[in-house]
Structures are given as C-alpha cells and as structure tokens.
Amino acid sequence: QAVYTVTQADIDAGGVTNQALAQAEGPDGTEVDDLSDDTSTDDGDDDPTVTPITQDPNIFITKVATEATYASVGDVITYTIAVENTGNVTITDIDVVDDLTGDSWTVASLVPGDSETFIATYTITQNDLDNGSVLNTAIASGTDPNDDNVTDSDDETITSTCIQIEAWVYLEGSAIDPGGFESYTLPMRTSLNDLGVLPGQTFNDLFFGEHYTPPGQPYNVEPWNYDGNEGDAFDSQGDISNGKAGYPETVVDWVLVSLREDPDGTGGPVCQAAALLHNDGTIEFVNGGFACCNIDLNGSYYLVVEHRNHLIVMSHEAIDVIDGKITYDFRSQQGYIDDPFEFGTFVSQKEILPGVFAMFGGNGEQAAGPQADTDINFDDRVFWETENGVFARYRNGDYNMNADTNFNDRTLWELNNGKFTSVPRD
C-alpha cells in the first residue's frame, strides 16, 4: 500500500497519474521487471492509473464603501475592493476593474484561499446629487488552468442624504396687470430682473446714476431669519457691465422653501433653502440643490413656499418621498386649508385663471405682530405707504412686482385685504 498527498499542481492538472514498477532477479540472475496496469481501462497493457480530481475554478470579488451616504459636491467615497480565489485551482492573469473610478489592477496569480485588496476613491459630482445615488461595479476576470475565463462582479450603491424638490408656484403680483386692473397673464413678468434690481444686480438709474442692490437671498431678516448663502453667487459687485449678476433671464424673484413633518411645523422646518422662481413657476435650487439634511427618505413631508410679500402656502397633504424626490405643483391645485367649521375664514391660493392658482399678493408687512406673516390686513397698507413713491428699487411694498412702488400696489392690497391663511409659520 502506498500513500500520496495531492498537491495544488495535481489539482491544477486535473488529476494524479501513477504507475508502479516492480523489479526482481531470477534464480539464474536475470533481471525481470513489470509496470503496473490499470485494469479498469481497456487501454492496453501497462497503462498508468489516473485518478481524476474535479476542478472548481471560482473567483469572488467584493466591494465595500466606507461611507454609507453622501451629502454634497466634493464628498469622497472610498471603496475597498477584495478579490479572492474561492475555487480549488490556481487562477492566473487576473484583471480587476473599478467601473466608476476607472482604476484597474493586475494580479499574476491566486492560489485557492488567497486574496488581494485594493483601494479606490470617487469624488461626488453635481450629477450624483441630482441622481440621488451612485452605483459602482467592480469586475474581476482571470484564467483557469484550462485557459477558460473565470469572472465575478459586485455592485455597491451609495445614496445621497439630499432630497430633491421638484415644485412650481405662481405669484399673483407677477401675474396681475401692473396697471392696477384685476386681470392676469402668464407666464409671470420678470420686471425686477429686466430692470436689474434683484439682489446683487446693478442698473443705470436715469435720475440718480448707477444703483447696486446688495447681494444675497432676501430672507435673512425677520420674520424668516434664514441665513443661507444661496444668493452670494449672484453679485455684479456694482459693475454695470455685469449688471444682471448672472441671473437667468426667466427669473422672477427669490422664494423660501421648506419641509415640515406636520402641518403646524412642530420643531421648525426639517429642511429649508432659498430658491430662484422662474416665470413659468419653476422653483430652481442653487448651490448644490435642496438642503442635504437628515431626513427619512421613506417618509412624507409637507412642502412650504414663502415669499417676501405674498401669503405663505403649503401642500394640501404630506408628500411621499419617491426615489429621493418630492414633487408638487401649486399652480394647478389649492394648497393646505384648515377650516374645520367651514366658515370660509381661511384661504390658500387665489384662482387667477380657470384652474390656475397663485399665492395671494399684498402681504408686505410680515414682522409687525404675531400673525402679521399669515394675514393681509391694514398693517400691509401702512407698510406700503412707507415705501410708496420709491421707484426702480427692490422693495417688499412693491406688491405687483414691477419695481415701482405706487398706488397700483395698494390696489392689489385692497383686492386681498382681510385674507388669512391657516398655515402657521413654524
């Protein structure tokens, strides 16, 4: 009986070949010998004994990101990529490719049980924020002893903590006839932008020369006290040659957008950001999109839009987050109204055209008292009077949004005097 220990080379070869040799000397001194024969085959005399070994070529790749989420452009995701020979034969000429980063590595060979580890990094782009997730695939491919290809791949998806908002709203003041008549035209006027009085813009005043409006989104004062820097990128720095400060020509004004977990806004806004409002009602977020904040991407939230001289509005119900996005169109539906006794006391939006809704204009004084921000009353007329006669300036008393504060703005206020919203400021 003979014992032989199988080697890796035997497995790679697919089996063990063995043949015994017997030698002896006869009585007359003649040497005799014989080779063993595998009697289980019909291959003839003295054929060797072949013991086949089942080959199982297999390679396994794993890719793990050290970061579970990302929040902004420039965040770096680090991937640890490990390739292991999980079969029973040697794999050679192994190529490892990271699909997202474009990195690649080569491993000469891996015997069963051995592994190699690699590191790849990826920097988040604006497109990644817009998409809400990053998919990365790593691929390993090698050759087994029979020159057959052996391959494996692994995917890793990293999600953004940013929630994307796709929303639209109209301002009554930018849709009403600026001459004081209650008629409405869409798309909204872009008078403030056309003249060059939006924050950060510069225009040539025929009477007083060049005028520079201080830059920044307008909600860093009471009652909003929002200190976001979204408006900083739009700054002409008083240079008339760059008077429009980079605003798209369709921009009407700034709005303030936030999310709430409940209608009362208990605990304050979950997320908040100033955004550009375009003449078709599109709300555009700048500086990397909406706030990247810690929210439940499987939750539901109320969407709130505020403007510096219009009544606050909120979605009529909580909106589900679908694929990292909240979508709501204020233009085609009434917003939230809490009027349990149906007295008709509260309003949401005004139907300015059949089936078309807009935020109520005329709410210029939003900081004088506890409810100044949620109603249109005589305080808003008094506020208008303090700015009446101010032309070609960015003013909250400019209710019809044409850059001139005059009696036509009071006319708009009179249309809405006495209107209340049931949406509290959170």
Image: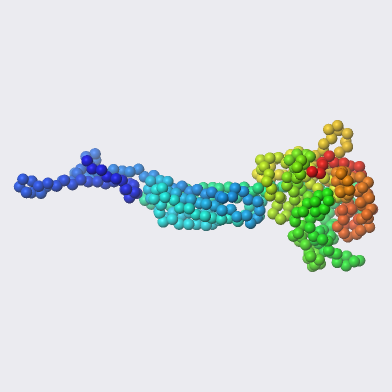
Q: Is residue 119 visible?
A: yes
At a point 89% along the width and 42% down the height, the residue shown is 419
Q: Position of residue 396 (x, y in %)?
A: 87, 53
Count of numbered tags: 0
Q: Where is residue 158 in the image (x, y as percent from the top left)?
A: 59, 48
Q: Nearer the viewer, residue 266 or 358?
A: 266
Image quadrant containing the C terminus: top right
Q: Which of 84 and 330 is in front in this view?
A: 84
Q: Which residue lies furthest to the top in this view?
A: 341
- In this picture, is 100 found above or below 237? above
At a point 77% along the width and 54% down the height, the residue shown is 227
The quadrant in which residue 241 appears is bottom right
Q: Is residue 58 visible?
A: no
Q: In the drawing, does residue 161 fall left or right of residue 188?
A: left
At a point 82% along the width and 56% down the height, the residue shown is 190
Q: Which coloring applies here? A: rainbow
At a point 73% along the width and 52% down the height, the residue shown is 285
Image quadrant containing the N terminus: top left
Q: Which of 365 and 248 is in front in this view?
A: 365
Q: In the drawing, does residue 82 fall left or right of residue 325?
A: left
Q: Where is residue 132 in the image (x, y as percent from the top left)?
A: 64, 48
Q: Where is residue 353 in the image (x, y as percent from the top left)?
A: 85, 44
Q: In the drawing, does residue 118 fall left or right of residue 274?
A: left
Q: Which of 102 and 368 is in front in this view?
A: 368
